[in-house]
Image: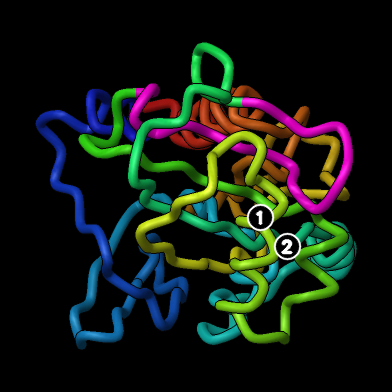
């Protein structure tokens, strides 16, 4: 999933695993502070985290949003997802080509064969729980929830799992989206919110949202 972004980022300075703690406007610049104490300035900002996290970041910097815009952003809602990454003793021959399927019933929403997809050198699968299962089990023991999902996947992954990990995505998939492909929160200096919760949603919608955000910034700075 990250290969396109890595290709587009060639020649750019990219900082990963860097947590922002505040974002504030100062004259014609945005000032971003990180948990490590670094400070960055920029003439324009595009925010693509889940909407609640973007709002929290803006609140830390006392960024004043119009009330109607804040209501729009607060109306965006997300499904949760519990995900299991399991290493198998042997490759699964029951997951159809090209390496993924969506069960029609039960607690699983998605099963993928990571070795068949070419992203794992050993037999391994990823299991995504349904939104209903994830919400019901969110505050329960993750290992127990993982075992339930593995058991539900037996007919596709076989009986032997060598090891597994469970991860919880609080903001997995937008359930209620904003109709606009992006939202311009400020023009001077430009601040645009974008991502898969805007426009049509999904990975395609996220790409279109990014393009819309770029156009909005260019229009705000025609020079």
The residue lying toward the viewer, choosing from 37 and 124, is 124
Q: State the image coordinates of residue 44 (x, y, percent, origin top left).
A: 41, 50
User: Is 111 above or below relative to 79?
Assistant: above
Label 1 – label 2 distance at C-alpha: 5 Å
- Mark with earlier residue (1, 2): 2
Q: Can you tell which mark lies on residue 80?
A: 2
Q: Residues within 10 Å of mark 2 (few under 14, many from 20)?
A: many
| Extent of the magenta region | 101-117
Q: Can you tell which mark lies on residue 49?
A: none
Q: Residue at x 31, y 79 (%)?
A: 33
Tag 1–tag 2 contact (CB < 8 Å): yes
Q: Quadrant of the C terminus?
A: top left
The residue lying toward the viewer, choosing from 35 and 137, is 137
Could you tell whether 200 is left or right of 53 in the image?
Answer: right
Q: Residue at x 73, y 62 (%)?
A: 80
Q: Helix or strand or loop: what does disc 2 sit on? A: strand
Could you tell whether 177 is left or right of 31 in the image?
Answer: right
Q: Residues within 10 Å of mark 1 (few under 14, many from 20)?
A: some
Whether 40 is among the magenta residues is: no
Q: Residue at x 53, y 48 (%)?
A: 159
Q: State the image coordinates of residue 9 (x, y, percent, origin top left).
A: 22, 33
Could you tell whether 140 is left or right of 169 in the image?
Answer: right
Residue 28 lies in what quarter of the image?
bottom left
Residue behind mark 1: 172
Q: State the image coordinates of residue 13 (x, y, percent, origin top left).
A: 14, 46
Q: Residue at x 67, y 56 (%)?
A: 151
């Amino acid at each position: 999933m990250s290969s396109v972004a890595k290709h587009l980022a060639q020649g750019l300075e990219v900082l990963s695993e860097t947590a922002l703690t505040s974002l504030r406007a100062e004259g014609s610049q945005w000032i971003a502070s990180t948990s490590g104490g670094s400070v960055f300035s920029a003439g324009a900002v595009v925010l693509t985290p889940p909407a609640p996290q973007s709002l929290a970041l803006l609140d830390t910097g006392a960024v004043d949003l119009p009330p109607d815009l804040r209501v729009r952003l607060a109306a965006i809602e997300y499904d949760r997802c519990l995900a299991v990454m399991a290493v198998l003793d042997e490759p699964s021959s029951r997951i159809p080509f090209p390496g993924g399927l969506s069960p029609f019933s039960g607690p699983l929403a998605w099963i993928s064969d990571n070795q068949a997809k070419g992203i794992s050198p050993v037999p391994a699968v990823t299991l995504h729980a349904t939104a209903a299962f994830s919400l019901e089990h969110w505050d329960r023991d993750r290992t127990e929830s993982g075992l339930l999902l593995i058991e539900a996947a037996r007919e596709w992954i076989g009986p032997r799992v060598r090891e597994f990990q469970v991860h919880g995505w609080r903001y997995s998939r937008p359930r209620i989206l904003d109709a606009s492909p992006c939202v311009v929160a400020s023009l001077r200096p430009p601040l645009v919110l974008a991502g898969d919760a805007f426009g049509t949603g999904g990975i395609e919608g996220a790409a279109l949202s990014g393009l819309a955000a770029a156009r909005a910034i260019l229009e705000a700075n025609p020079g």
